[in-house]
Image: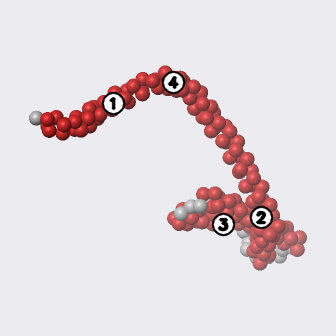
Amino acid sequence: MLTYVSEQTYVFLVTLYGGIIIGFIYDLYRIFRLIFSPKKIATMVEDFIFWILISIIATLVLVFGNEGQIRFYTIAGFLVGALSYNLLLSKIIITCIVKFLIKLKKIIIKLVVNPIKKLFQIGKIPIRKVKKITKPHVRKLKRIKRIPNRVMKDTKKYLKYIKDKK
C-alpha cells in the first residue's frame, strides 16, 4: 500500500484538526464539571460518556480522513492537535465560554425571575391594604386572646388572699 507524502500531510492535518476538536470537547467537559461538580458515580458516568464521544470522533476522523488506517503520523496528529489546542487556545476559549454562560444566566434571570418579582410586587399592594385594614382588629383579637390567661393568673394570685380571710 503506497501512500504519497501529500496524502500523509493531508491525513496529518485532518488528525491535527481532530485533536483540536477533542481538546475543545475536553474544555467543555471541564467547564461542565466545574459548574455542576458531580458526585463519584456521576463522574464515572460522565467520564464514560466523554471517552465514548472522543472515541467516536477519533474513529470518524480516521475513517473519513484515512480510510480507517492507523499510522504513527495519525496518532501524532491527534496528540499534537490536542496539545497545541490546550497550550494555545484553551484558556481563551474557556474564558469566552464562561463569560457567555454568565451573560446567558443574566438573560435567563431577566426573562424568568424579574417577571416573577413583578408579580410579587403587584401582589404586595393588596396585601398591604388588607394588612392596614385588619391591623387594629388583629390587635384587639390578641388582647382578647390574652384575657383568659390574665384571669387565671389573677385568680391564682388573689386566691391566697381569699382563703386567708375565711
Horizontal relation, residue 74 to residue 30: left or right: right
The kind of secondary structure element at disc 1 is helix
First in residue order: circle 2 vs circle 3: 3
Residue 17 in view, yes or no: no
Task: Give the amino acid type for the residue marked by disc 1 in the picture.
Answer: Lys
Q: Please name which of the two marks, 3 or 1, marks the residue nearer to the observer.
A: 1
Q: Position of residue 64 (x, y in %)?
A: 75, 62
State the separation of the CA atoms marked 3 and 1: 74 Å
- Mark 3 is surrounded, within 10 Å at the Cα level, by few (under 14), some (14 to 19) or many (20 or more) other residues, namely few
Residue to which mark 2 is pinned: 90
The kind of secondary structure element at disc 2 is helix
Residue to which mark 4 is pinned: 132
State the separation of the CA atoms marked 4 and 2: 60 Å
- Quadrant location of the C terminus? top left
Marks 2 and 3 close (CB-CB < 8 Å): no
The quadrant in which residue 111 appears is top right
17 or 24: which is nearer to us? 24
First in residue order: circle 4 vs circle 2: 2
The number of numbered discs placed on residues in the rendered structure image is: 4
State the separation of the CA atoms marked 3 and 4: 68 Å
**Label number found at residue 74:** none
105 or 23: which is nearer to us? 105
**Label number found at residue 145:** 1
Residue with the most extreme top position: 133
Task: Give the amino acid type for the residue marked by disc 3 in the picture.
Answer: Ser
- Does 37 appear above or below 126? below
- Mark 2 is surrounded, within 10 Å at the Cα level, by few (under 14), some (14 to 19) or many (20 or more) other residues, namely some
Residue drawn 74% across and 55% down? 97
First in residue order: circle 3 vs circle 1: 3
147 or 91: which is nearer to us? 147
Q: Position of residue 70 (x, y in %)?
A: 73, 74
Residue 132 in view, yes or no: yes
